[in-house]
Amino acid sequence: DYCTFFPLMVFTRTFKIPNEIHIKRVPSMIPVPSLAALILVLLATSTSATASPSIDPFFVPTSSLKLSSSTPTTSPAYASKPSKQHSSSTSTKKHEEEKSVDIVIGIDGGTESIRACCFDAHTGRILGKSCAFPYVTSHPFPGWAEQNPEDWYECLAGAVRGALASLKNGNDGNDFEATIKKDTESIGSRESEYNVLAICCDTTCCSVVALSSDYKPLRPCLLWMDARSAVQARQIMDIAGEAAKVAGEEITALFPSLRVNSAGQGPISAEWLLPKAMWIKQHEPSVYESAEVICEYQDYINYRLTGRMVASSCNAAVRWHHDGWEVSEGGKEGDGKENDKLHAGRPMKLYRELKMEELAEKLPRKTLAMGEVIGGLTEKAASDLGLSVGTLVVQGGPDAFVGMIGLGAIHPGDLCLITGSSHLHCLITPYPTSAAGTWGAYRGAPLPHLNFAEGGQSSTGSLVRWVRDLVSSSIEDGEKVSYQVLDEEAGEIAPGSDGLVALETWQGSRTPHTDPLARGAFVGLTLSHTRAHMFRAIMESVCYGTRACFDALEAASQQHSELTSTSGTRIKSDEVVIAGGATRSPLWLQLHADITGKTFLLNENTDGPLLGCAILASVGAGVYGSVDEAVKRMVRRERSIEPRDGIRKTYDKLYKNVYLRLRPGVKDVVHTMAELRGGASTMASGETKSIIRVSSGIDSMQVKQNNIWGKHCPNNLRGGDSQRVGSKANAPVISPSLLASDW
């Protein structure tokens, strides 16, 4: 090699070739001595060489050479170099000295598409543009939602190639032909500028996949929003409750894993993995028996990238009823059975009571924490993505909770609010305490040494949109009133909307009062109220509900006396990091601060999932020694919104004296109405039938054929709609983080 590179070094220095030039290893078929001799002849006959005696031909700065990976790849333009396990104190200095840029790729697997984006591995700055590839969701029956797992991988490959293509000449990454074409020219040739250190992926949580012995999907994925397992979710609580009654114990004493479901009071969400696995066992027994692995989107996509089947400890902690600390650390405790140490952190006692002990053997055997290295890209994956074989793949997790990392909410007391069609509230707690009206706290999530609890509001951004659409219906040209106009009009109304108050539970209530039958209300309407009053009242009601969720989370986190400070005062979160759609409305942002009494913080980059993946990838690649250190370097606050003192006091009175009294009053009425009108379904001859009708012109058989696997399911197995059993309305309950789909 030196025989080749020594004359190349001299050639580079003498002829002032740009330092960024990327010198590749010489292919073996070229005679090395001949090439060296040719370059020496060029040097000897060059007037530049004799005219520049001051240049030392033996001095070559390290920045002038960038050797590409010796591993062959279909797209050497983005070859990744081996991870440098260097200390973070020197990483920034080295980064500044080098001309090339270390990059990591964040990948966000959402409900409708998968996105990829390149980031500077040291600063977290976006490089190029994000690229998204959509995939298809099938709804074979009302309440069902399925996707083809193969689509996830194919779209991921396209998204990564598109993100890489955007690095070249400002390409936006959305040229389909350019991003899919696999030759080097389609990706670019500026190979010295970027070194891909690692990639990391987040995905929707509880998108459940059944795989054969050769890891091929046996059926379509049950998407997170699929509610067919509502019956099984109720069965789990009923069976556990009956067992606890017989044993004369509290349900959480007998089955500690149920503590995360409102301190054992339930309900369990139809979203979660356990009820979905139970549905497959009960209604597709051949699929269940044939399944070598039952896993999630996250696990499947990482297997396709690395050939390793591992679970994310965050997914396991928040949606599998696992102890996130024990499963990530290997565990030391069982509950009396000899093989329980092999399944440390898993709810083996609950599995046995449900007669599903075999599920422990079907779940991924190994669990890794977010930020740990799963492995390197396989040869096929490297070819598909346009990266080098062995490029590091780092463990991610659920999109919303990777988003917590990207927002910088990783310390006890940190509170974040993620807004979209719904609101999701997450609080990092010192202990894994639980209480009614909250979900969690989950031990070992989002990271193994942390705990967090969550709350949620079902309809928030969707409610604001509903009002906007309602007041726009009379406009002749079909144009809708802009949110900006409504914001300005509502801003002229006094706090309290001149006596008009709303209850925001249009689509049921998640927390702090779990009630799928809850409905919304306007109270205090008069002929003097305008669309501006309605718009402001709705915004205020969402903020009242947010305050109620914050209060419940903080109360739940303070169940232990150890949570009091030395002065005896309770720990309270005074700041909230906010992201999502609500940040686009200055009025709504200010109302959140005024009504909750907290300071709201906005980050420079509010795309928490993608930035969170970049942070985890940088840690896995060794750029930073910990997630905490990476967050300090890569997450930047942009501005804050403070509560206005006088207005805060006004809203404090309205919250305590009006809003909190409105909910129980409306509850009795809407529950009675649900009984009188039959809720969302009817009972006939003892058979559960869905009241939700298929669109006119499409019969049920056509709907069945929409399923790409062609599975047949009779009506009485659907289970995804609100159902009536006896005289009770039993709408499926969905946990708060479902809103992650519309981040």
Image (tube, rainbow, N blue to C red):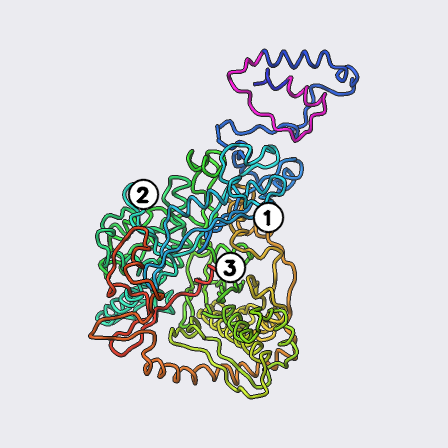
Residue 533 in picture, x, y percent from top left: 58, 80
Tell me if residue 743 comes above or below residue 174 in the rendering: below
Residue 442 in picture, x, y percent from top left: 42, 61
Q: Quadrant of the N terminus?
A: top right
Instruction: Return the residue at label 3.
Output: 743
The numbered dot on residue 124 is: 1
Decide: few, some or many residues near mark 3? Use Cα within 10 Å; few <14, some 14-19, many ≥20. Answer: many
- At 52% from the left and 84% from the top, the residue drawn is 658
Earlier sequence position, callout 2 versus callout 3:
2
Provide the secondary structure element on which disc 3 rests. Answer: loop
Earlier sequence position, callout 1 versus callout 2:
1
The answer to whether residue 561 of the structure is visible from this angle is no
Provide the secondary structure element on which disc 2 rests. Answer: loop
The amino acid pointed to by label 3 is Trp
Query: Do residues under tags 1 and 2 come within 8 Å of each other at their CB atoms?
Result: no
* Main SS of residues in magenta: loop
Q: Which residues are magenta?
A: 7-33
Residue 203 in picture, x, y percent from top left: 44, 52
The amino acid pointed to by label 2 is Tyr
Q: Is residue 284 toward the left or the right of residue 384 in the image?
A: left
389 falls in the magenta region: no
Instruction: Return the residue at label 2.
Output: 215
Query: Do residues under tags 3 and 1 come within 8 Å of each other at their CB atoms?
Result: no
Tell me if residue 199 comes above or below residue 429 in the rendering: above
- At 59% from the left and 18% from the top, the residue drawn is 2
Task: Report how far apart the C-alphas of labels 1 and 2 lie in the structure.
Answer: 35 Å
- Judge by depth and name the residue closer to the eye, 678 or 352: 678
- Judge by depth and name the residue closer to the eye, 473 or 163: 473
Q: Which quadrant of the view contains residue 380?
A: top left
User: Residue furthest toward the bottom?
Assistant: 527
